[in-house]
Image: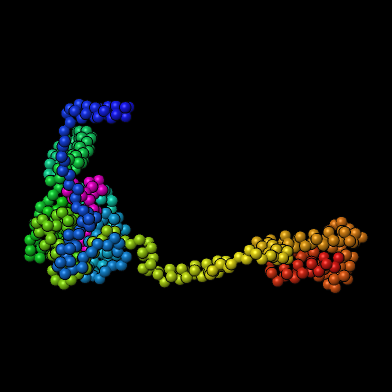
Amino acid sequence: MKPLFMRHLMALCGTLLLFGCSGGHWEEVDRVTGYKGKARVNPFLAAERLLDSLGHDAHTTKSLAKLPSTNAVIMLSSEGDLPEGRAKQLLQWAYSGGHIIYVLSGTSPYNDFDRPFGSYFSAVLLEEEKDPFLEKLGVGVQKRFSDDDHKDNLAKSEESETDKQEAKSDDDEESKSENDKDAKIKGKKIKGDEEWLVSDREVNWNGKTYKLSLGGYQNLILKRKLRPGEFSAGSKNESQALHLKHGMGAVTLLVHARPFRNHWIGEHDHARWLAALVGDYGSKEVLFLSHSSDSFFGLLWLHGWKAVVALVLCIVFWLWMQMPRFGPMAEVELDSTRHFASHVGALGEFFWRMRRGPALVQAAREAIWVRVREHHRSLDDGSRQMNDQLAEEISRRTGLPVKRVAAAFDVAPPESAHNFVNLMRDLQAIRRAL
């Protein structure tokens, strides 16, 4: 009866809970999570397949231990903290005929539908850090602002010039406005209002015009004039992309990798521009590089594999010399009986292996002194030191020279096995003779 009552009570409570709630509603929310599979972790998968279809060999690599031939194209990013030595090596490779596409940001695998330009803070940090690759090319980087921010800066600079008497207060207001300006940009980033970051430009290169959708949080500043065969997306003081001649090769600089990412490569002339940068003629190797330098062990194996192999062989030989046993274990004979002498011999071998030879020599000498005190009390003076009378008596009984008898008690325990065996043989002969 009681279980039936409990069932009815639980059913009643469930009914009251369902029909007693008011104000509840369902809401469907669509959230774009981005690509899946290989395209989620490789933002340049579409660019690789495009170049492969054009006859090139395009692939992504995590490190570059050995530079390819100068007929290749390398796309790398400054987000991997390029060392100065590596930057010099890459520029020397480009000077010999190679082509480098150097991107300031936008090479990490993030969701293009949620953050079109990636992290704002990591991108702005590039302005504070020195980039050895850009410095050697004579290119600078500055933070990018919207048109409204530029107008505010011009108005404030004119106001500060006209009012010299209130320079200090003007400086305080200017610094405050800059903080508000940074907060404004960050607010736009958080709200998703990044339309002003997108820059649609037309680039003329090699007699062709390319419509590109560039953008990013920085601008490139070229500290020299453009040469024939070079181009700039925008003014050379506020450029979103630069293509510079470097010796027999070329270097293409991009503020953001937006035109080559999976979500944007199909727009405008991005695909056609990428194919033109790589080259319309011949088959080339195109490397999309995640990191500019290989790991320590990779470089060690590449440049010092002979030394590594020799070291491994030495370690194997040392282990072969030090290991106590190789091969199958010997069977233990549990039913066999060992003699007492074998136990004593094993004990002596153990002491010798543990470098306790002095203990064995001292025990043999103590046994002789006990025999002298028991059977030749007249020759024992109690000092436990060998005297002439006792040495002559032992020499007469054992046939050993007097000097050898005295040395058996006076010399330090030897470290060599041969001398140790001779000393113990003399002590045992003296004990048996007494």
Is 97 in front, or is 280?
280
Which quadrant of the figure has residue 48? bottom left
Task: Tell me if I can see residue 138 in this picture.
Answer: no
Q: Residue furthest front?
A: 1
Which quadrant of the figure has residue 14? top left
Is 420 in front, or is 402?
420
Task: Tell me if I can see residue 46 in this picture.
Answer: yes
Is 147 in front, or is 120?
120
What residue is shown at x 12% (from left), y 51% (from top)? 199
What residue is shown at x 77% (from left), y 62% (from top)? 364
Judge from the rendering whether residue 120 lies leftward or rightward of residue 423; answer left or right: left
Placement of 22 over or under 102, stated as above or below: above
Q: Which residues are magenta?
A: 100-123
| Image quadrant where one finds the N terminus | top left
Judge from the rendering whether residue 198 lies leftward or rightward of residue 322; answer left or right: left
Is residue 177 on the magenta stretch?
no
What residue is shown at x 17% (from left), y 44% (from top)? 31
Image coordinates of residue 188 in percent, x first then y, are 17, 41
